[in-house]
Image (cartoon, helix red, strand yellow):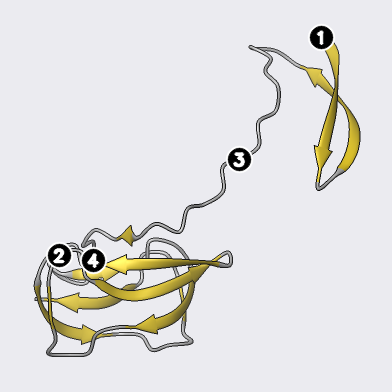
Amino acid sequence: MSIKKFNIKVNGKNYNVEVEEIGGVASAPTPSAPVASAPVSSAPTGGGAGGITAPMPGNIIEINVKVGDTVAPGDIILVLEAMKMKNNITAPSGGTVQAVNIKAGDTVATGEVLVSIG
């Protein structure tokens, strides 16, 4: 086992850290990539053939459809905020909105059926 020393700068402050290698291939720590605010499409899993489910837990910010609306693939159905990032939830396929199971301000869990499209 060996100890490696690193100088890391975070928000303009320098930090000296020591990392102990415990086995395997050692590599320098890499920062995780920020989450992009690209549209997130949820595959129809659960809630029938056209159930759009929450891909992650979060809060519903905006709903762009109502029952009876016709949507095309890729249309933005709603906006879900997760970890202070706004995520566009899009229609995986075209059809007519059969049910809207949430309202703006709701907190949802991963896998929860948000909107049904038939």
Residue 31 as seen in the image, left or right of residue 54 = right
Residue 82 as seen in the image, left or right of residue 39 = right
* Residue that badge 1 annotates: 1
Q: Residue at x 13, y 64 (%)?
A: 93
3 vs 1, front mark: 3
4 vs 3, front mark: 3
Spatial CA distance of label 3 from label 1 is 26 Å
* Residue that badge 2 annotates: 73
Residue 12 as seen in the image, left or right of residue 98 = right
- Tell me which amino acid carries mark 1: Met
Spatial CA distance of label 1 from label 4 is 49 Å
- Of mark 4 and mark 2, the one earlier in the sequence is 4
Q: Position of residue 10 (x, y in %)?
A: 81, 43
Query: Around disc 2, counting alpha carbons within 10 Å, would you say few (fewer than 14), some (14 to 19), or many (20 or more)?
Result: few
- Residue at disc 1, secondary structure: loop
Q: Decide: marks 4, 3 in contact (CB < 8 A)?
A: no
| Marker disc for residue 46 | 4
Spatial CA distance of label 1 from label 2 is 54 Å
